[in-house]
Amino acid sequence: MKFVDEAIIKVEAGNGGNGCVGFRREKYIPFGGPDGGDGGDAGSVYFQANDSLNTLVDFRYSRLYRAENGEKGMGKNCKGKNGKDLIIQVPVGTIVKDADTDEIIGDLTRDQQTLLVAKGGVHGIGNARFKSSINRAPRQFTPGKPGEKRKLQLELKVLADVGLLGLPNAGKSTFIRSVSAARPKVADYPFTTLYPNLGVVRVADYKSFVIADIPGLIEGAAEGAGLGIQFLKHLSRTRLLLHIVDIVGNGDPEDTSQIITDIRKIEAELSKYSDFLANKQRWLILNKIDLIPAEQQQTLIQAIVKQLNWQAPVFAISGLAHTGTQQACFAIMEYLEQTTATPDHLP
C-alpha cells in the first residue's frame, strides 16, 4: 500500500434550509393564518481518528467533501429536515491545518477522537414566526445561513513509542525485522526503505511498544538531500530515539574515526532540522557486532563511548544474528514504563 503522509482537500458544510411563506387553507376555515415552517439546520463536517488507518492515500484521489444541506421549511408549520453531518475517517496522528492561514485547527492523537472542521449553516425562519397582533398575515421569512467552506492541509505524524534513525544501510530495517513482525524491505544498497514502517515489539504478556523505522539520513538531509528529511517529523512524537550505527566502520576494529564521523553526521542533521528532536532522549545501538572479533568488541565499544563522551545507554547488537536485541528491548520497555508520555512528546 502506498504511504502518503500529506494531502490538501476542500470541505464544505451544508447550507441551512430557507424558511417558508405559507398560509392555512382549509375548507370552512376562513382567514387562515400563516403556517410557514422553519428550514432545517445543515450538516457539519467532522474528522474522526481511526486507528485502523495508517495513510492519507485516499485523500489524494478524493479532494472535495460536502455535508448535506438543510431542507427548506414547508406549510402546516412543518420544519425542514436537518442535513446529515459528514464524518471523515483519518489515521490517528493526523494534524489538520487551514491551508490558507497555516493555523492548526486540531491534532487527532486518540482513536475515535472527533474534530469539527466546518460548521453547517443555521436554518431560516418561516413566516409563522413573524405573526403578531399587528401583523396577522406576515410574508417575511429568512433564508438559511451558508455553511463554512475551508481548504485544509492534512499532515500525518505516525504515533510510535520508539523511533529509529541512522545512515542508509546501518541496519535499521534489519533491527525492526528482528524484534517485531514488521517486514520492511532489506537489501545491500542505500535507501531500501522508502517510507516509514511500524512494528509492535512484544516483550511479555500485556507488555509491548511500537517502533518506527524511517528512511536513512545522509549529510545535507536538512537541506533536502536524500529521503529521510521528509519523514523526520514522524520521530517527533516518539518518546525515545534509537540511533543505529554500523560498528564495522572502515573495516578496521581499532580505528573508530569512521564510526564517530557517522554518528556526528546524524547529530548535525537533527540539530539543523529541529532543536526539539535533537534534544530528545537518544540511545546508541551499535549494530553488526557479529562482524567484529570477540576479543576486540569491548575495546571498540569503550573507545566509541569515550570519544563521544556518551552518557545515555549503549547496546551492541546484531540485528541479523539476533544478538543483544532481546536485552535492548527489555531495557526499552523498562524505560517506557518508568517515563509517562506527556504533551512534551507531541510538538
Image: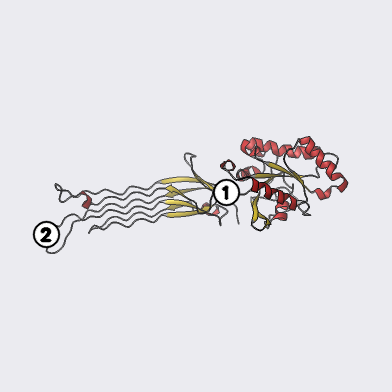
Q: Residue at x 77, y 54 (%)?
A: 322
Left or right side of 292 for 40: left
Q: Secondary structure at mark 1?
A: loop
Label 1 amino acid?
Asp
Task: Check the picture and name the quadrant holding the C terminus.
Answer: top right
Mark 1 sits on what residue? 5
Left or right side of 278 for 51: left
Which of the two labelled residues, at mark 2 and mark 1, occupies the earlier sequence position? 1
Foreground residue, 42 or 199? Answer: 199
Q: Residue at x 34, y 54 (%)?
A: 70
- Determine whether label 2 and label 1 are within 8 Å by CB: no
Observer able to see residue 294: yes
Q: Residues within 10 Å of mark 1 (few under 14, many from 20)?
A: many
Label 2 amino acid?
Pro
Task: Check the picture and name the quadrant holding the N terminus.
Answer: bottom right
Observer able to see residue 227: no
Q: Position of residue 41 (x, y in %)?
A: 34, 52
Q: Secondary structure at mark 2?
A: loop
Mark 2 sits on what residue? 30
Where 304 sits versus 173, above or below? above
